[in-house]
Image: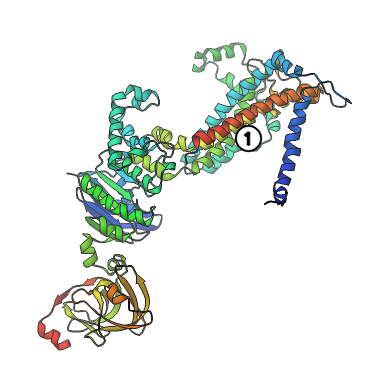
Amino acid sequence: MTSISLSAIEKSFGNTPVLNGIDLDITDGEFLTLVGPSGCGKSTLLRILAGLEMPDQGSVTINGLTVNNVRPANRNLAMVFQSYALYPHLSVAQNMMTPLRLRDLSFAGRLPFLGPVVARERYREMSAQVGETARVLKIDHLLDRKPGQLSGGQRQRAALGRAMVRKPVAFLMDEPLSNLDAALRIHMRSELAELHRSLKTTFVYVTHDQAEALTMSDRMAVMMEGQILQLGSPEKIYNDPMDIRVAEFVGAPKINLLPGTLDEAGHVRCGGMVLSRITSNETVGSITLGLRPEHLALCEQGALESLTGQVVHKENLGADIYLHVSVLDAAHRIVLRATPDEGTSVSIGQTVHFKRLCGHAMVFGKDGGRLGLSNAAHESVAEVA
Amino acid sequence: MQGTNAHWWFVGPALFLMVVILLMPIGIATGLSFTSYSLGNPGADFVGLENYEKIFTRSTYEKMFGATFRYVFVVVPLSVGLGLGAALLINSTRRLGDLYKTIYFLPVMAALIAMAIVWEFAFHPTIGIVNSTLERGCGTFLESWSWYANGCERGFPLWLTDRNYAIWTVAFIGIWQGFGFNMVLYLAGLTSVPRELYHAAEMDGAQTAWDRFWLVTWPMLGPTTVFVVTISFIRSFQVFDTVEAFYPQGGGPSKSVYVMMFAIYEKAIQQNLMGIGAAITVVFLAFVMFLTLVQRWLIERRVHYS
């Protein structure tokens, strides 16, 4: 049973604070993603876990042992770097053998020329291990090539192979897919997730791409400004963001945010809309209403609680059509998802009517925190309606 | 392209200059090496391979090759090794790196002929700082080294005028003068080693500096090393000014420091034997050419990994 925990990690580079008190527990075998915009400290956190950076404060625990003063080499972690960091002078097989060579061989066994003779048995085992890993990653035909002769995707696999060839406590991945082209990236997403399922080892994965985080992880931690804003399953993060920044970061196209007000009865009003659910929060005043594009639907003119606006842009993705509509006297722009059936007939400049699907709107207070909504008694809904 | 001569205008100037300032002099020198030409003579006799025969048979030239190769094979490995060592040390310190760089680079910038005078004083058998320093060590544990005890008893060597020591002393000055240059080249090479490779090595279990050096630094410095070694070879083959400064007459005690460049100078300029001078020049050129070809071959075959 291996668990990794980071507690009260603080780090600053010079006068710039990068991490402000991060607490994170990673359970054995999970795929945890650290996701956030550039500069949020996610890579630094991973490097602190790896031991490549020292935290200013706080402790890193692996298997119940504090490893703050343990060298990266002794933490038994494997890392895949964004640039892959393959040794350019070694073939793929030699690259993959390096961790085994450095860890499992005595000094004599590592000598050039003499080593393979002294530790012949061990070398045979190591080659077998490398071959097996290469077969899993389908790079066994590339073992004799140098990294310079490989394509981006093949290099990525070779780097994965170098990490996988031994049995580390956890795999740390620092944006491993960001140097690949879009199609390959999407392909590798599923492949990495499958790999994780078959290896059953902990993966800690850093990315700035929320789609990668949503598709691959068991849990994801959304980081911003050196803090973890929310930690939870991808479904929870997407459907139930606790902070307006999380809601904005996760989901593509971005969530629509509209200004609204909260009345004494706890109803949220925005334009012609009044939410049927009420908030127990007492603070009356301005709030922000969040509506995801898929929670809006085109409707007939004059439908109850509909919004009206002019289409300014249309994005056709084949299966979905996203309409950009300027609403509330052209002060705000809303993206809504339409099916191809409804969407194709809409042209730019046209006025459209749409309404929200009930029960999905999110309300954020002035400080950006989420306000809870609950279903009110039936008569009060009738009253406002 | 058909029918136009524009391409000649592009390559013409470079081609012309290359022929006039490179190929023609080499051709003329090669031609002269088969004659007994002297400057000022109206004509010259064609002597065939006689000049080359002299070079490869006479004992003077045997000494010339001996001195040259001793010098080259001492100076090149040591100045490359020290250059790499100094570069690694400077690269690992955060403070004072620039100061060390300047100090080690000073001998490169200084005129060697001027420095030779300083060294001549330093190596002076009676008033020189080297031997007087060595004498202070007499009577201490250093005497357990038999060479040292010998020196205390019978006097320390006359570094520059003893034929057993002269070439090594000159080589020492060559190293002192040359390794700063190699250090600068290595420092430039070190900045291009990706930091991530060291991190990868660390994650792969390279715990000692030795492991990291062999896994990352040394292979990544491959192109730099090939260049540094070639440059050092060519520079050491070309050594002239120290020899000329120390031994203006005749190339040191028993011609033990009679290096090739000095031989060319002595034969062709001082003695006005252009034929033999040209022949030595051609042999010298062949060495340098060979080294350059080896370098090209190594660079293309081994050390460029992409």
Q: Relative to A35, does residue A281 appear above or below in the rendering?
A: below
Residue A260 seen in the figure: yes
Color style of the picture: rainbow
Q: Which SS class for mark 1?
A: helix
Q: Position of residue B256 (x, y in %)?
A: 67, 17
| Residue located 77% across and 19% down the image | B48
Considering depth in this image, is B195 or A291 the residue closer to the camera? A291
Badge 1 amino acid? Pro
Q: Quadrant of the C terminus of chain A?
A: bottom left
Q: Chain of mark 1?
A: B
| Residue located 13% across and 87% down the image | A382
Residue A288 position by quadrant? bottom left
Q: Position of residue B80 (x, y in %)?
A: 55, 31
Q: Relative to B219, does residue B30 appear above or below in the rendering?
A: above
Q: What residue is shown with label 1?
A: B107
Q: Quadrant of the N terminus of chain A?
A: top left
Residue B37 located left or right of residue A279: right
Residue B232 seen in the figure: no
Residue A208 located left or right of residue A193: right
Q: Relative to A114, does residue A271 appear above or below in the rendering?
A: below
Q: Position of residue B225 (x, y in %)?
A: 53, 34
